[in-house]
Image (tube, rainbow, N blue to C red):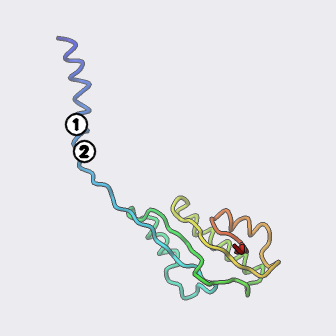
């Protein structure tokens, strides 16, 4: 008889947890893409408020900061490149596991310091990657 009481005490907590775990439905998640431009002054999607909103939304799996198609950064000086890098690092700090960089920064040769290019690569971007002929 004592064996049955032991099993009852072990089974009771599991039985109480069973309905709770079955009631949760999986959340359908999606990714958000925010385009990054040479001039982001009018880009309302690339803002602290938008990034924080997406970071706190459980339905958003990843936030991809993506270089806009055809966008080049050849007009930027090395000091402006550094400012852009810091801007992207701050965006990454909002949600380190959600924010990911995508795309290829194309700078004028010599305008992106080695340290800045390494930092951009660590954020998920590539720097001055050349298309290889097939």
Judged left or right of residue 73, residue 115 is: right
**Corner quadrant of residue 69:** bottom right
Q: Are marks 2 and 1 in contact (CB under 8 Å)?
A: yes
Quadrant containing the C terminus is: bottom right
Q: Residue at x 79, y 79 (%)?
A: 111
Q: Nearer the viewer, residue 35 or 134?
A: 134
Judged left or right of residue 86, residue 46 is: left
Mark drawn on residue 16? 1
Q: Position of residue 90 (x, y in %)?
A: 60, 69
Q: Position of residue 79 (x, y in %)?
A: 76, 79
Q: Residue at x 52, y 62 (%)?
A: 95
Q: Where is 78 relative to 24, above or below?
A: below
Quadrant containing the N terminus is: top left
Q: Which residue is mark 2?
A: 20
**Corner quadrant of residue 96:** bottom right
Q: Nearer the viewer, residue 113 or 16?
A: 113
Q: CA distance from mark 2 to mark 1?
A: 8 Å
């Amino acid at each position: 008889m004592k064996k049955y009481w032991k099993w009852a005490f072990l089974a009771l907590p599991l039985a109480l947890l069973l309905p709770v775990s079955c009631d949760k439905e999986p959340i359908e998640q999606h990714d958000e893409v925010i385009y990054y431009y040479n001039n982001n002054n009018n880009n309302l999607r690339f803002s602290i408020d938008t990034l924080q909103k997406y970071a706190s939304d459980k339905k958003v799996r990843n936030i991809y900061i993506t270089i806009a198609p055809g966008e080049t950064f050849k007009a930027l000086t090395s000091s402006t490149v550094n400012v852009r890098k810091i801007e992207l690092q701050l965006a990454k700090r909002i949600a380190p596991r959600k924010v990911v960089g995508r795309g290829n920064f194309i700078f004028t040769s010599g305008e992106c310091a080695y340290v800045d290019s390494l930092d951009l690569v660590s954020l998920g971007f590539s720097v001055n990657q050349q298309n290889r002929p097939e």
